[in-house]
Amino acid sequence: MPERSAALPLAAAPDAVGLSAPRLEAFGARIAADAEAGRIPGAVVLVARRGQIAWQQAFGFEDGDSRTRPMRIDSVFRLAAMTRPMVAVVAMRMLEQGRLALTDPIERYLPAFARMSVGVETTDASGGERRLTLEPARRAITVQDLLRHTAGFTYGPFGDSLVQRLYREHALLDARQSNEQMVARLATLPLQCQPGTQFEYGMSTDVLGRILEVVAGADLEQVVADELTRPLGLHATGFGLRGGADASLALPRRGSGAPGGVLFDYDPVDPPRWFSGGAGLLSTASDYATFCQMLLAGGTHAGMRLLSGKSVALMLANHLPPGIDYGSSTPGLGINAPVPALGQGHGLGVGVRLDAGLCPVPGSAGDFFWGGALGTYFWADPSEELIAILMLQEKDIAVRTGYRTLLRNVVYGALLD
């Protein structure tokens, strides 16, 4: 496919697409003040409606504690878990090409995952010692399980179960590994829960990334380029910085008192070798807005169809079955948690809103969303033709959660129609 220009056109003014400029600017003043006070290093915020960028601004500095490089609207951010929707679209492309199916057991592509065991934790009644016993998995893990986080995989840093301790001991988030090496380690460890019984946020999309490599016969960097970034013209999106320079990479706080992180570091001089399907991509607000707009448009962009409308509809539907349980790390997802109490579910690679109420932030039934452990966040609302993207490198959970809530409140409050 030929390369295309990624950027959405700029609206003449926010009110030209039904948004209040003063209300958006008030939010910008809050972010600017927080960046000036050093509460956050900096941020880029983009709001688009009806296929046009209504408002975008950069705040603070790219270089974290150094504060020498002003943030730019084209600054590059580590997406962390906002990588997942993009990898999910690549998987949907392969479904349409007949190279993959949601019902496929993953052992078809990764034989090491045949005959998996599940860790069952018990506590000794007398001494209180925790013990791990193993039981066979009752069914195979499917590709659908990977996309909706019902495979039974977990994340080592997101809790202290005995299975999660094993994840940490086996260094499953090692930036120097390949996807092939990662799944070889992971396949030797027990699952956190039985496949299909629980939403357990974990390394499912990383396993999916390895399956895409096997299907395509290329590494995930090449697969994502061939199936997504090159066709859409996302020239700043990839597993490494374009050109190899670090001048445009936004950095988190790293000095004394800065919060610790759960994700591997990114060194521009020696970037990670692991093309993590769950957390490895870098991008800009503009590139990610184009990606979201393609989904809002039913799979098309600039006259080119990337996915069929039915594939997009399937991706953005709720795939969590009734009565499913939720892992202990789920509350940590905050307003992204795909739980009935919030009127939300999970599609294929994204969270989806099912009800207008219940969730304590505004939205519409049918909007889809996700955020990353480094502070990035997005949602897109088909009924309002609306996209909002927050690019922030902030490891503190409370800080990034506060901005996500604030952004939802302000953007919906800025609607004029």
Image (spheres, grey):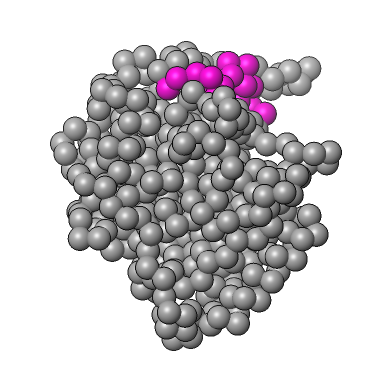
Q: Residue at x 57, y 32 (%)?
A: 268
39 magenta-colored: no
Quadrant of image for the N terminus: top left
Is any atom of residue 19 visible in this view?
yes
Camera-nearest residue between 64 and 397: 64
Quadrant of image for the C terminus: bottom left
Is any atom of residue 149 visible in this view?
no
Q: Which residue is drawn at 76% across and 21% down?
A: 128
Q: Quadrant location of residue 130?
A: top right
Residue 409 percent location from the top left of the image: 59, 72
167 magenta-colored: yes
Q: Which residue is drawn at 54% across and 73% down?
A: 411
Residue 55 percent location from the top left of the image: 51, 71
Residue farthest toward the left in the current orientation of the protein: 98
Residue 369 percent location from the top left of the image: 46, 56
Indicate left or right for 171 with 123 as reference. left
Camera-nearest residue between 347 and 16: 16
Indicate left or right for 374 with 310 as reference. right
Indicate left or right for 379 with 227 as reference. right
Residue 148 percent location from the top left of the image: 40, 42
Q: Quadrant location of residue 103?
A: top left
Residue farthest toward the bottom in the current orientation of the protein: 417
Residue farthest toward the right in the current orientation of the protein: 256
120 lies above or below 46: above
Indicate left or right for 312 with 189 as reference. left
- Counting the numbered discs, the total is 0
Q: Quadrant location of residue 90?
A: top left
231 lies above or below 357: above
Camera-nearest residue between 370 and 33: 33
Q: Which residue is drawn at 44% across and 29% down?
A: 275
180 lies above or below 349: above
**Span shown in magenta:** 160-179
